Image (cartoon, helix red, strand yellow):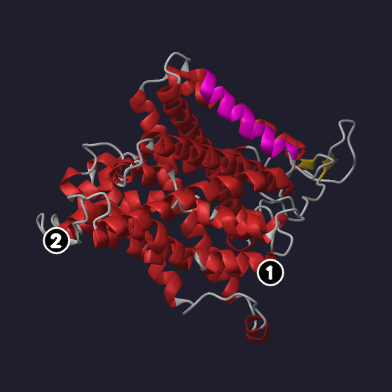
Amino acid sequence: MPVGNPSTHDGTVQGGPLKRELGERHIRLMALGACIGVGLFLGSAKAIEMAGPAIMLSYIIGGLAILVIMRALGEMAVHNPVAGSFSRYAQDYLGPLAGFLTGWNYWFLWLVTCVAEITAVAIYMGIWFPDVPRWIWALAALGSMGAVNLVAVKAFGEFEFWFALIKIVTIIAMVIGGIGVIAFGFGNDGIAVGISNLWSNGGFMPNGVTGVLMSLQMVMFAYLGVEMIGLTAGEARNPQKTIPHAIGSVFWRILLFYVGALFVILSIYPWNGIGSAGSPFVMTFERLGIKTAAGIINFVVITAALSSCNGGIFSTGRMLYSLAQNGQAPAMFARTAGNGVPRNALLLSIGALLLGVLANYLVPEKVFVWVTSIATFGAIWTWAMILLAQLKFRAGLSTAERDRLQFRMWLWPMSSYLALAFLILVVGLMAYFEDTRVALYVGPAFLVLLTGLYYGLKLAPKDEAGEMVRSAS
């Protein structure tokens, strides 16, 4: 599938460049927003039920692993800022098959995630408008976010900026208000609540180390999306400056928004009572005397879901564009419109999401849960490929080239190996617990299917003798 550069009759340019229109404020806020999903606002009740107050420890451990993964991605993204990001790096340093699997796996991962987010928008709009059929809200969410992505990358950046700001302001307000309840007794007749709830209901780790381990797979799935920052490198105005700043603060964002919010919630309310009385965010704001708390949080959850959908459409479009540029998807998807947007790639992703919304209402719920398990496995695959590609990338540099790197992985290679070991532990935990074991049937089966398509459609690059090139090395 050759990729050339001729203009086409519809105004697109095959292989044309993306436009660098994402400024520093866009990427900084996107990096903040990428860590904050719908699940945090709805309480992360299941994870809290498993680990109790020690869920904070789970988020810190997972956050350290994500910090290493993002540092590895940042090193490659600053050195070579391209739209395909980790898919392109996997191809360059691990071989064309690794790039193909990583790219298409990530495309499908976000497709599944976007369907879930669109459905969430429909459900929460239904709270305000119970008589309107849900499919109308799902279609409106997909149509509006699809249009934003098709207009220009700057429009995508602006929407993501404001979506992220809404989430961030809400969490900070909740944390500050919660500290007022804990330390000064706001909303509690001036009687300080204190933090004794962190250990007075069976201890800080009521379900032992097992509970913390059980929660890890859910915690890691909550971090899905943070790697999207790497995909913005091809459209950032100054990637050498903005990408390191965005990645460098990942761990501190996790501490503030996840651990900080959970610290406040678990201090105010007994951990074994959370989830039975609705969103802890709603409960906290109502305790501070804000009567419209439920409506405010409903609005924030809707914007969080729209933000995830917006980012997912962006991610799938750029990944498909990159795959087409590498000859691993039809060449028509490597074309960009006059505004620098990969229109054809975005339209295919939006069309697939349209089918996904329909399927979400037609297929049994259990089948849909099986499909979403691909996303869980796919996230771990993506992170593992980032680490492996970075190990190969750094090993291939001379001493002088390593010294010239503008953004470096800490404690290389030990940090990369430790993060890989942690991901293997999470996969082992998924195999151990029955609820998540299905992911290890569906995920690898999907990769086997992709491998069959790769060789069956002869997408592997050829050498001069016409033989398939099996490895980049």
Quadrant where the image shows the C terminus = bottom right
Callout 1 amino acid: Gln
Q: Position of residue 454 (x, y in %)?
A: 60, 42
Tell me where residue 113 appears, x and y as whole percent: 48, 38
CA distance separating discs 2 and 1: 45 Å
SS for dot 2: loop
Q: In this view, does 266 lie to the left or right of 12?
A: left
* Residue bearing mark 2: 199
Task: Please give the range of residues in magenta.
Answer: 136-151
Q: Classify mark 2: residues with Cα within 10 Å, few (<14), some (14-19) or many (20+).
A: some
Instruction: Give yes or no for residue 41 being in the magenta stretch.
Output: no
| Number of numbered discs visible in the structure rendering | 2
Q: In this view, does 374 lie above or below 237?
A: above
Task: Give the mark nearer the N terminus: 2 vs 1.
Answer: 2
Magenta segment's dominant SS is helix
Mark drawn on residue 240: 1
